Image: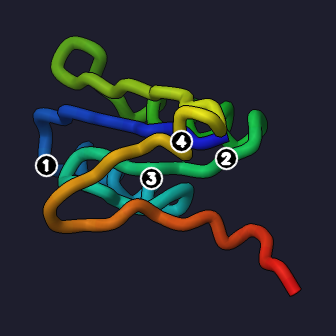
């Protein structure tokens, strides 16, 4: 399933740590937004990795699951691109 993960992290060190974690799971689509195509297990691991680094009094992270019908309807304009699913190909 595709997840959009958005964050607002107050501390530079924590922000870098969380960015590094997210880079291992998905692609950055804006400065503080990542698209992550993940299984349920990967999602649980990512969420735990982020939550253990989060300062809940200062930081915010949101995980938005996007169903396949919704992810096909993503509309983007301007710079950047929508990541294509290269998990399959046609012969």
Element carrying mark 2: loop
| In the displayed structure image, the side of residue 64 where residue 29 appears, left or right | left
Q: Is residue 18 visible?
A: no
* Disc 2 residue crowd, few under 14, some 14–19, many 20+, Cα 10 Å: some
Color style of the picture? rainbow
Judge depth for marks 4 and 2 and give the one in front.
4
**Residue linked to disc 1:** 12
Image location (x, y in percent) of residue 62: 37, 25
Q: Residue at x 65, y 38 (%)?
A: 68
Residue 58's quadrant in the figure?
Answer: top left
Quarter of the rendering occupied by the C terminus = bottom right
Label whose residue precedes the other's in the sequence (1 or 2): 1
Residue 53's quadrant in the figure?
Answer: top left
Label whose residue precedes the other's in the sequence (4 or 2): 2
Q: Residue at x 40, y 61 (%)?
A: 82
Q: Report if the CB atoms under discs 3 and 1 are less than 8 Å apart.
A: no
């Amino acid at each position: 399933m595709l997840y959009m993960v958005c964050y607002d992290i107050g501390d530079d060190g924590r922000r870098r740590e969380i960015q590094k974690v997210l880079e291992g799971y998905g692609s950055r689509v804006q400065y503080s937004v990542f698209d992550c195509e993940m299984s349920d297990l990967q999602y649980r691991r990512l969420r735990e990795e982020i939550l253990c680094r989060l300062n809940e009094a200062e930081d915010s992270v949101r995980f938005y699951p996007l169903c396949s019908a919704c992810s096909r309807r993503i509309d983007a304009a301007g710079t950047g691109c929508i990541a294509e699913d290269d998990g399959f190909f046609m012969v």
